[in-house]
């Protein structure tokens, strides 16, 4: 390092012996300290160091906050950052949408959850700040009183980061799956009605017990098979067209056909088709297959 052209240069040993003299000189101009023949330290006033360092620190913090905020805005998850005073310092775009909070609002964590949840959440934030370890807590969002959030809390340089999961959605999914299984078991008990899920490419995505019972084929044989191969060759084109129509229109359709079974020969059936939507897109097709002769038998006294 080349020293600037100045008289304010001193060896470390001379600085120690005459510190008062060099301290007075440092008030007006930084003093460069030579240690073992090399410039190693600078003696300067606190005011000068604050003036030199503060702009960079502020710029660094502002840059960090800006880049972190831009990253949060892209996250599909509900993420909140809170400080020790429970003030929300940053939130993801998904969180703003979920809690209906516009950009730039000064938000308190207490405003986002209902009354009974506030103390639990505050205590969890306090534990994370004090221990430096993660925690989790249940809370009810103020905007959706009937739902339950699971908050996963983690230490963060800006306070506490919280990832919110809608636990009610997971509960609803479990209930829906249980209901779907029960519905198919009821179909299987009838032995003349079956359900299936058909992919956009026309293959059997799910072969539940009712379809196994109606066709006499194993779930391994049914899984991944093209649905129309279960249909008599004379009806395949018509069934295939009905499936394509449902996929294109996002609606439903009904078609009569003959179903091939393993052991019971051919069976006349009615097939009901309906699009399964995920958001605005059709993800697959639900099918209900009912044997018409079996249904007539069920109607008999």
Image: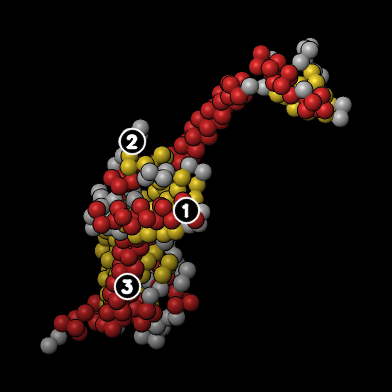
Q: Are marks 1 and 2 in contact (CB under 8 Å)?
A: no
Q: Is residue 276 left or right of residue 17?
A: left
Which residue is rendered at x = 48% and y = 42% of the image? 158
| In the image, residue 127 above or below residue 66 | below
- Kindly state the secondary structure of the residue where label 2 is placed: loop
- Kindly state the secondary structure of the residue where label 1 is placed: helix
Residue 281 visible somewhere in the drawing? yes
Q: CA distance from mark 1 to mark 2?
A: 24 Å
Between 189 and 26, the one lying in front of the other is: 26
Q: Is residue 106 left or right of residue 223?
A: left
Residue 20: image quadrant is: top right
Classed neighbour count for the residue bearing mark 1: other residues with Cα under 10 Å, few (<14), some (14–19), many (≥20): few
Say whether disc 3 or disc 2 marks the residue closer to the N-terminus. Answer: 2
Say whether disc 1 or disc 2 marks the residue closer to the N-terminus. Answer: 2
| In the image, residue 173 above or below residue 67 | below
Q: Which residue is mark 1?
A: 130
Q: Which residue is mark 3?
A: 178
Q: Which residue is mark 2?
A: 106
Q: CA distance from mark 3 to mark 2?
A: 43 Å
| In the image, residue 39 above or below residue 80 | above
User: x and y percent of residue 140 in the render?
Assistant: 28, 56
Q: Which mark lies nearer to you, 1 or 2?
A: 1
Which residue is rendered at x = 20% and y = 84% of the image? 297
Which residue is rendered at x = 73% and y = 19% of the image? 22
Q: Is residue 205 left or right of residue 99?
A: right
Say whether disc 1 or disc 3 marks the residue closer to the N-terminus. Answer: 1
Q: Are marks 1 and 3 in contact (CB under 8 Å)?
A: no
Which residue is rendered at x = 38% and y = 43% of the image? 85
Between 144 and 122, the one lying in front of the other is: 122
């Amino acid at each position: 390092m080349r020293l600037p052209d100045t008289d304010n240069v001193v060896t470390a040993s001379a600085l120690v012996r005459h510190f008062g003299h060099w301290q007075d000189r440092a008030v007006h101009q930084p003093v460069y300290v030579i240690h073992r023949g090399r410039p190693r330290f600078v003696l300067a006033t606190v005011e000068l160091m604050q003036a030199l360092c503060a702009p960079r620190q502020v710029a660094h913090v502002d840059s960090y906050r800006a880049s972190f905020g831009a990253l949060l805005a892209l996250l599909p998850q509900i993420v909140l950052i809170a400080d020790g005073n429970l003030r929300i310092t940053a939130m993801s775009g998904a969180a703003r949408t979920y809690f209906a909070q516009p950009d730039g609002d000064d938000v308190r964590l207490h405003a986002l959850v209902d009354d009974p949840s506030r103390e639990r959440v505050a205590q969890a934030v306090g534990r994370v700040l004090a221990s430096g370890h993660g925690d989790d807590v249940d809370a009810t969002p103020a905007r959706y009183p009937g739902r339950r959030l699971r908050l996963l809390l983690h230490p963060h340089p800006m306070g506490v980061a919280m990832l919110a999961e809608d636990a009610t959605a997971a509960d609803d999914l479990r209930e829906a799956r249980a209901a779907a299984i029960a519905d198919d078991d009821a179909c299987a008990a009838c032995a003349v009605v079956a359900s299936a899920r058909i992919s956009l490419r026309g293959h059997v995505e799910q072969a539940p017990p009712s379809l196994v019972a109606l066709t006499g084929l194993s779930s391994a044989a049914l899984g991944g098979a093209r649905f129309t191969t279960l249909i008599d060759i004379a009806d395949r084109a018509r069934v295939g067209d009905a499936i394509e129509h449902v996929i294109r229109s996002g609606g439903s359709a009904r078609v009569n056909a003959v179903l091939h079974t393993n052991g019971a020969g051919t069976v006349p059936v009615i097939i009901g088709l309906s699009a399964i939507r995920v958001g605005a897109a059709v993800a697959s097709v639900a099918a209900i297959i009912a044997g018409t002769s079996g249904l007539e038998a069920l109607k008999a006294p």
